[in-house]
Image: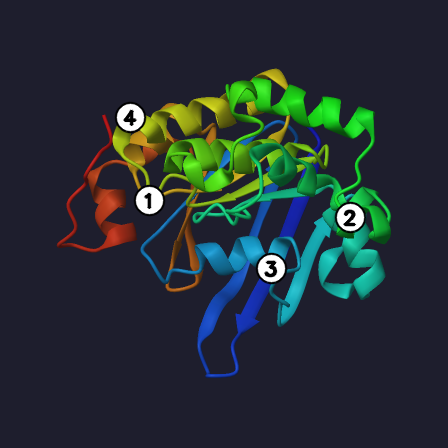
Amino acid sequence: MSKTILEIKNLEKFYENGVHALKSVSFDVKQGEFLAVIGLSGSGKSTMLRCINGLVPSSSGEINFQGQDIISLKSKELRLARKSIGMIFQHFNLISRKSVLVNVLSGSLAKVSLFNGIFAKFSKKETDKAMSNLELVGLKDKAYIRADELSGGQQQRVAIARALMQDPEILLADEPVASLDPATSHSVMDHLAYINKELNKTVVCNLHFLSLVRKYATRVIALKDGKLVFEGSPLDIDEAWFKRIYGEQAREVGIE
């Protein structure tokens, strides 16, 4: 039995405008899992991932990771904890005018001095590691071109290589293929699956399409109106569960 790497207990998030985004959400994540998180837009998926890595402060509850409660950590302690939590965003968040290599190297900023980070001074070891990560996502030949010269799928693969620079214990991906075409979506998901299976990195991934969830995830949870309403195997989400999660009028659309 794999050990628990992340434990969420009674997680709550209230925003100042009165929105109750997360309502007593509890679940565990096992080492080596590929956990998919599904639900309608506004169900709390993105808020939850941002609470896990401390980008958004939680209102109450517990987020236990590596023996620490993320919610209770001070700023310095939180920065240290984040070194083990990689994050991939829907919109890539690359520095468009910088080279692909520099974008990937920026993933190691937490481990280099402030001076070296400001002036983009990285060691040969870090540069070699960045090139190795680019090779892993099939973009080593693009290392020295500007990031904005790449396609959307290529930019997302650069973002994956950047996240790997941290040597994260867990990789959080927030709708990583939402803005990509079907073929490119599978390419990005294939790389995440490789990282999960071959590098033994735990992945928690927000996804819209159940066809991707069924193909890539080992387990799935569903949020609805900020509440956890399903936890189990992707194959257990039949038509009845689909309508409970997405609504009676919803129709499933897949990515082939």
Q: Nearer the viewer, residue 129 or 115?
A: 115
Q: Which mark is residue 162?
A: none
Is residue 114 placed above or below 159 in the rendered structure?
A: below
Question: For numbered disc 2, what is the local secondary structure?
Answer: helix
Is residue 11 placed above or below 53 in the rendered structure?
A: below
How is the structure coloured here?
A: rainbow
Contact, mark 3 vs mark 4 (Cβ under 8 Å):
no
Q: Which residue is drawn at the image coordinates 50% and 47% (left, top)?
A: 96
Which residue is under mark 3?
51
Q: Nearer the viewer, mark 2 or mark 1?
A: 2
Kindly indicate the quadrant of the structure image that contains residue 108. Answer: top right
Give the alpha-carbon distance from disc 2 to disc 4, as whole Å.
36 Å
Q: Nearer the viewer, mark 1 or mark 3?
A: 1
Give the alpha-carbon distance from disc 4 to disc 1, as whole Å.
12 Å
Instruction: Point out the tag, 2 or 1, that comes first from the N-terminus.
Output: 2
In which quadrant will I find the C terminus? top left
Counting from the top left corner in percent of width and height, residue 146 is at 51, 37
Q: Residue furthest bottom?
A: 17
- Neighbour tally class for label 2: few under 14, some 14-19, many 20 plus, Cα within 10 Å: some
Question: For numbered disc 1, what is the local secondary structure?
Answer: loop
Q: Nearer the viewer, mark 3 or mark 4?
A: 4
Which residue is under mark 2?
117
Which residue is under mark 4?
183
Which residue is under mark 1?
179
Q: Amino acid at mark 3?
A: Cys
- Neighbour tally class for label 3: few under 14, some 14-19, many 20 plus, Cα within 10 Å: many
Q: Amino acid at mark 1?
A: Ser
Contact, mark 4 vs mark 1 (Cβ under 8 Å):
no
Counting from the top left corner in percent of width and height, residue 73 is at 80, 62
